Amino acid sequence: MKTEYQKKLQIAARQTILIHRADTLIRIILRTIVQSLKVKHAGIFIYDKNKDEYVVKVSRGHCNFKIPTGFVKIKKDNPFVRYFTDKSINLTKEHILWDKILNYCKTPAVKKNEKIKNILEGVKTNLLFYQAKACIPGFFRDELVGILFLGEKNNKKKLDDDELRFLSVLASDVVMSLKNAWLIEDLNRQVELNKRLLLQTISALASSIEAKDKYTIGHTERVANYSLAIAIILRKHKKIEQWDKFFENLRIAALFHDIGKIGIPENILNKNTTLTVAEREVIMQHPAIGANILGHVEELREAIEGVKYHHEKYDGTGYPYHLKGQKIPLIASIISLADTFDALVSDRPYRKAISAQDAVEKIKKVRGSQFMPCVVDAFLQMYNNRIKFTDLTEKKAPWLIEGKTI
Amino acid sequence: MASKIRQKVLVVDDEREIVDFLCNFLQRFGISVAKAKNAQEVFEKHKKDKPDYIFLDIGMPECDGLEVLKQLKKNNSKAKVIMITAKTDKNSLATAKKYGAIDYITKPLDLGELSKKIEDYIL
């Protein structure tokens, strides 16, 4: 008898390791309990920390007694919970057994103590509600995470010590796997939250440039959207290592590409007559200023390249570093094209916008001189295949849903 | 006088397991039960079994509980109705009250509270 349970325990332990989803494991464990102990039904209350109550998550069995998942709850003042957690109850915390509770109720010590008597009476009522003969607690340190409850055995016999030990081990298995699952959920949620926070901070910072330079309202967001669209196409033709990371950096760099304009005087930025040579020199420093501003953030290293080199040209005539050809990082080449395209189709202090088709023609002409050829090809494919540039005065590039990749 | 007559409860929910569970629980109090899983069955069983009480789920897919309640009252049903609801949605609870429901229970439910309601209203 004993070895049989040990074998079952070993199997259960192996499953704990193999199965990552807590609810799957709990279902298997309850099935194991119903089958190997031959009880009429079994179920488990699991603590829900958001609602601060215990809910029946899984219930197995026949004889018309199966509690629908999530249909029944107990609060923390329920006698089951109080029995296991109230320190003043000086009775075994290993389990609740129907016969033992009946016996406790008859002892003089309990009869004298009103509080314990009430709790035990409550335990009896609840055992009847759930048609249960036994409850086994699942603790993690001091915290009651779950309560197993079992109906009577098919042969009406009582649970023996071996079986109770078996149940205790299973209960702690359930608790461990729940704890693990919750931990992983929390971690993932935290990572997501941090990412979102970073992007929101970046968007807020990026829009501070637009506050200064009134002609560029919505420009950063559109450049980010065009850049991502180009990258999506580019990925089909070009091997990009760590694509997800690249995509994320591109988005950040595109949002930040003009952050350096914060360091340029407003009278130069918003000037509607021709700039002097000296003024042009100042403006041409904005990629370097931007890279310096962001330079302190180690995590943004690759994104900074996009900011720093977004005015470089393929033939080396760009500014401020005069990089040439493949020396210009891909991330910067993409932003460069997206930036130019959006500038062409928008009104500027010194000239009117041109049509999207005219802008495309202009871009075609400078393939290989101003822009990296593969980036132009990807841009054209994007333009020809799926996008009608119907209304570029709209804030967003409308065909791109944020975060969506193909 | 009333306590001598065996009370009858019609349990209505689109989920079979919930109906079975609630019926099983009610029967343990010596209450006789009838089951329905949609609006049509409610009206059929209501006519046939003449329940004293109805446990009525608010969130049923095709015809929701509030609509069923309205129809029942229109047909001068004598049955006292207790709503079952997934969330404490104040609007639908107010509507339920307006249409004459005597009380409600919230999912997930506490069997202690449920049994108290059974004692208060039915037994």
Image (cartoon, rainbow, N blue to C red):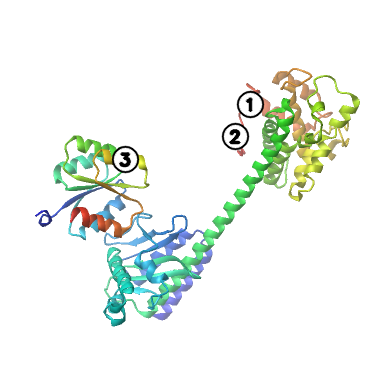
SS state under label 2:
loop
SS state under label 1:
loop
Rendered image quadrant of residue A310: top right
Which circle's residue, 2 or 1, is located before the other in the chain? 1
- Which class describes the residues within 10 Å of circle 3: few (<14), some (14-19), or many (20+)? few
**Amino acid type of disc 2?**
Ile
Residue drawn where x is 73% and y is 20% of the image: A347
**Amino acid type of disc 1?**
Ile
- Real-space CA distance between mark 2 and mark 3, rounded to the nearest whole angstrom: 40 Å
Rendered image quadrant of residue A361: top right
Name the spot of residue A242 as percent of width and height, x first: 70, 47
A283 horizontally vs B6: left or right: right
Residue on which disc 1 sits: A387
Labels 2 and 3 in the same subunit:
no
Name the spot of residue A273 as percent of width and height, x first: 83, 19
- Which class describes the residues within 10 Å of circle 2: few (<14), some (14-19), or many (20+)? few
Q: Chain of mark 1?
A: A
Rendered image: mark on residue B94: 3
Q: Is residue B60 visible?
A: no
SS state under label 3:
helix
